[in-house]
Image (tube, rainbow, N blue to C red):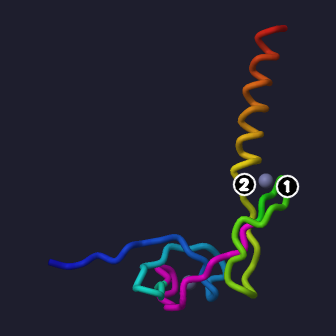
């Protein structure tokens, strides 16, 4: 029986982009360039309110996402917009 390593999305310092990586304990191997390196976590900042959701690995690029609070707010806004459309 062969144990299949988990494929995860991680930042590759060699490709300088998010690529598929095969997980090997604390290290990951890039599926695109076969470079093995420690797991890199990017600094994750909310695009809406600039809340830092993940400090990430020092010296790594920043990626943008949406924090739970803003995603909730956005969903509420969409629902409110729908209500407005029904009223008019
Ligand atoms: Zn790579
Ligand atoms: Zn936010």
* Other residues around mark 2 within 10 Å, as few (<14) / some (14–19) / many (≥20): some
Label 1 secondary element: loop
Can you identify the residue that label 2 sits on? 67
Query: Residue 70 or 29: which is nearer the viewer?
Result: 70
* Other residues around mark 1 within 10 Å, as few (<14) / some (14–19) / many (≥20): few
In the image, is residue 48 above or below residue 86?
A: below
How many angstroms separate mark 2 from mark 1 (CA)? 8 Å
What's the residue at 75%, 78% (across, down)?
61
Relative horizontal placement of residue 7, taking residue 46 as reference (left or right): left
Q: Give the magenta range.
A: 30-44
Q: Where on the picture, by quarter, is residue 88?
A: top right
The mark that comes first in sequence, 2 or 1, is 1
The reply to whether dot 2 and dot 1 touch (C-beta < 8 Å) is: yes
Label 2 secondary element: loop
Asked if the stretch drawn in magenta spans residue 42, the answer is yes
Give the percent coordinates (x, y) of residue 38: 54, 89
User: The N terminus lies in which quarter of the figure?
Assistant: bottom left
Asked if the stretch drawn in magenta spans residue 11, the answer is no
Give the percent coordinates (x, y) of residue 55: 72, 75
Residue 49: mark:
1
Q: Residue furthest left?
A: 1
Give the percent coordinates (x, y) of residue 78: 75, 30
């Amino acid at each position: 029986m062969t144990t299949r390593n988990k494929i995860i999305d991680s930042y590759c310092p060699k490709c300088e982009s998010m690529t598929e990586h095969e997980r090997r304990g604390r290290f990951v191997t890039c599926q695109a360039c076969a470079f093995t390196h420690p797991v890199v976590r990017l600094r994750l900042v909310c695009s809406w309110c600039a809340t830092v959701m993940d400090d990430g690995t020092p010296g790594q690029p920043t990626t943008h996402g949406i924090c739970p609070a803003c995603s909730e707010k956005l969903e509420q806004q969409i629902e409110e917009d729908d209500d407005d459309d029904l009223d008019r």
